[in-house]
Amino acid sequence: MLNQSNVMISANISEYLLEKSRVVHRGGEECNFHIFYWMNAGLSPEEVSLYKLQNMDRFR
């Protein structure tokens, strides 16, 4: 949930069961996705510099 300033103020976490095969291996046609791509995309250039992050396009 976001407040009026679009700042996250709460979240809901659900359990999700992963298939063992998807955790330790990915198929040839499958892409890997990580929540940190989304988190990084929302940062300002100043925050990226502050946290010493790199351009995420480099890792795709």
Image: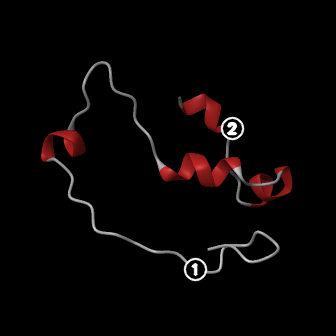
Q: Which of the pair 36/2 is nearer the observer?
A: 2
Decide if residue 21 is on the left or right side of residue 31: left
Task: Kindly give the residue lying farthest to the top in the view shown.
Answer: 29
Decide if residue 4 is on the left or right side of residue 12: right
Q: Where is residue 13 in the image (x, y as percent from the top left)?
A: 40, 72
Which residue bears the numbered disc 2? 55
| Residue type at numbered disc 2 | Asn
Which residue bears the numbered disc 1? 10
Decide if residue 46 is on the left or right side of residue 48: right
Residue beneath the point at 44% across and 40% down: 33
Q: Position of residue 8 (x, y in %)?
A: 66, 73
| Residue type at numbered disc 1 | Ser
Q: Where is residue 24 in the image (x, y as percent from the top left)?
A: 20, 42
Pointer 2 and pointer 1: residues touching (CB < 8 Å)? no
Residue beneath the point at 68% across and 38% down: 55
Q: What colouring method underlies this structural image?
A: secondary structure
Q: Quadrant of residue 57?
A: top right
Residue density around tag 2, few if under 14, some if 14–19, many if 20 or more, within 10 Å: few
